Image (tube, helix red, strand yellow):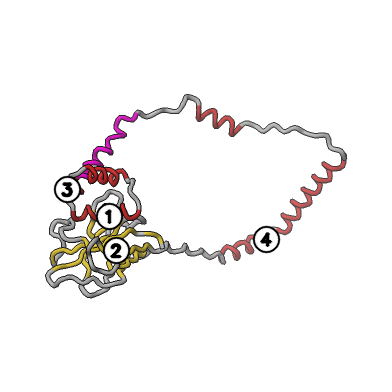
Amino acid sequence: MNPDDQFLAAELALGLLEGPELVAARARLLTDAEFAAETAWWQEQFAGLADDAVPADPPAGLLEGIEERLTAPVRVVSARRPWPWFGGGMLSGALAAGLAALLLMPGPEVIERVTERVVEVPVAAPPPLVAVLAPGKGIDRAPVAAVYDQQTRTLRLTATITVPADRAAELWRIGSDNVPRALGLLSPGNRATIRIEGDLVLQPDETIAISIEPAGGSPTGLPTGEVIAAGPLVTS
């Protein structure tokens, strides 16, 4: 592997790539075993960078000092009142306001009726994620749009994928760990809708890709055929 590819794998492992470069590098993981192995090697090397880090304890008494400052009494500097009746008047007014509040406070039966009418406001559904799966270099295909409903966890393609009779189109997801995971096979000639099962949850900036595999799907759990389209998920 040439130095440029090694450097690209290191950037991918560190999470430094963005936009089209990130999508292209993740798509390459699907078809280039040597590049995938190089990326995994860099991830392993970088994972050990924090092994030698020494935990640092805060200075002794730091927390006690903060708590003491927060609970310390506030010193109030009193000023001479220009009018002797001002304080008394204010006090009388405060007492009158308190009595009025007590007199006007609704009884228990009124509070109960109001409580019964409280309605929970439904939480707004999260916005869908969308991806434009652009064809790879030299592939004569139209882009395919994908829409992921975060509430129902379904991924829907807005166009059909045409493949030979003895082959199948398989959908993949590549997250921040740079590991391709199969999402399912696309039915030939139909706009596919795939439900994401288990603990897998699609996130923004993850890459969605389509590869051409044997009729039953990839026999290895990883892409074995040509990647015909790929693109990042973004918030709509």
Q: Nearer the viewer, residue 107 or 14?
A: 14
Q: Earlier in the sequence, mark 3 or mark 1?
A: 1
Q: Which mark is residue 34?
A: 3
Q: Amino acid at mark 3?
A: Glu
Compared to 192, does 71 lie above or below? above
- Magenta residues span 38-53
Q: CA distance from mark 3 to mark 4?
A: 75 Å
Q: Are marks 3 and 1 in contact (CB under 8 Å)?
A: no
Assess disc 1: are there few (<14), some (14-19) or many (≥20) residues with their C-alpha within 10 Å of its C-alpha: some
User: Alpha carbon of mark 3 to alpha carbon of mark 2: how far?
Assistant: 24 Å
Q: Amino acid at mark 2?
A: Ala
Measure the alpha-carbon separation of dots 4 and 2. 65 Å
Q: Quadrant of the C terminus?
A: bottom left
Q: Secondary structure at mark 1?
A: helix
Task: Return the disc, 3 or 4, that comes first in the chain's sequence.
Answer: 3
Circle nearer the N terminus (2, 1): 1
**Which badge, 3 or 2, is on the more N-terminal residue?**
3
Q: Position of residue 176 (x, y in %)?
A: 30, 50
Q: Which residue is denoted by mark 1 in the rendering?
A: 24
Q: Which mark is residue 134?
A: 2
Dot 2 falls on a residue whose secondary structure is strand
Do labels 4 and 1 touch, CB within 8 Å? no
Residue 24 quadrant: bottom left
